[in-house]
Image (spheres, rainbow, N blue to C red):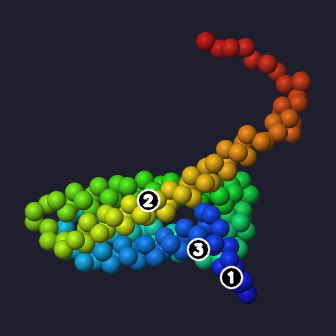
Amino acid sequence: MLNFDFSRLLRVPDFCKPVQLLNGLILIICIASVTQVSGVGYLWFIIILQFITSAVATVLFAAGLQDMIVSSLTDRTLPWAFIEMCYSTVFAILSGISVWIALRTNSNLLVKSGGGLVAGAVFFVAQAGLYGVPAYVYYERNREEERNRDITANPRYLDNNAPEYGYQA
């Protein structure tokens, strides 16, 4: 039986997950109002990919299953925070590219978007921010953990019998 704890989604940066879903729904509505032209297919691909990823991440996180699933898939080599930082960074960049594509497609005189692409560009900016916040927060946490890591705990650090190799030119 899954035990959903929605209070976990009220902390920074976890509150971004349900807001990403809501913003994704608004993006679907905005882009659905546009006639099918070149460039809109890319926007659809990004919106659907982001929506599915955010939905899965939100359900896993609310159920508290993210660490168990990620550790079983990666043999405990990657933490959930690193994976979330990676996909958030990629989606923030793709959302920024989508802003440019939406505005560029809207400037085409043959497209009758009725404002759907302009509104989509505005919500893509919001989506970039909603993915950028977790990426930045997890990046800073990772940097802080690296700074505080004790390298003397590494057995290779204390191995005085390790051969030394000279500089190779």
Residue topped by disc 2: 128
Element class at badge 2:
helix
- Judge from the rendering whether residue 144 lies leftward or rightward of residue 59; answer left or right: right
Residue 23 drawn at (x, y percent): 43, 72
Residue 164 drawn at (x, y percent): 79, 19
Residue topped by disc 1: 4
Between the residue at mark 3 and the residue at mark 1, the CA separation in whole angstroms equals: 10 Å
Q: Quadrant of the C terminus?
A: top right
The tag on residue 58 is: 3
Q: Earlier in the sequence, mark 3 or mark 1?
A: 1
Say whether marks 3 and 2 touch (CB < 8 Å). no
Q: Earlier in the sequence, mark 3 or mark 2?
A: 3
Residue type (three-letter) at the residue carrying disc 3: Thr
Q: Quadrant of the N terminus?
A: bottom right
- Judge from the rendering whether residue 48 lies leftward or rightward of residue 33; answer left or right: right
Say whether marks 2 and 1 touch (CB < 8 Å). no
Disc 2 packing (10 Å; few <14; some 14–19; many ≥20)? many
- Judge from the rendering whether residue 75 lies leftward or rightward of residue 118; answer left or right: right
Element class at badge 3:
helix
Residue type (three-letter) at the residue carrying disc 2: Ala
| Residue 90 drawn above or below residue 6 | above
| The residue positioned farthest toward the left in the image shown | 110
Residue type (three-letter) at the residue carrying disc 1: Phe
Element class at badge 1:
loop
Can residue 25 be seen in the rendering of this structure?
yes
Between the residue at mark 3 and the residue at mark 2, the CA separation in whole angstroms equals: 17 Å
Between the residue at mark 2 and the residue at mark 1, the CA separation in whole angstroms equals: 27 Å
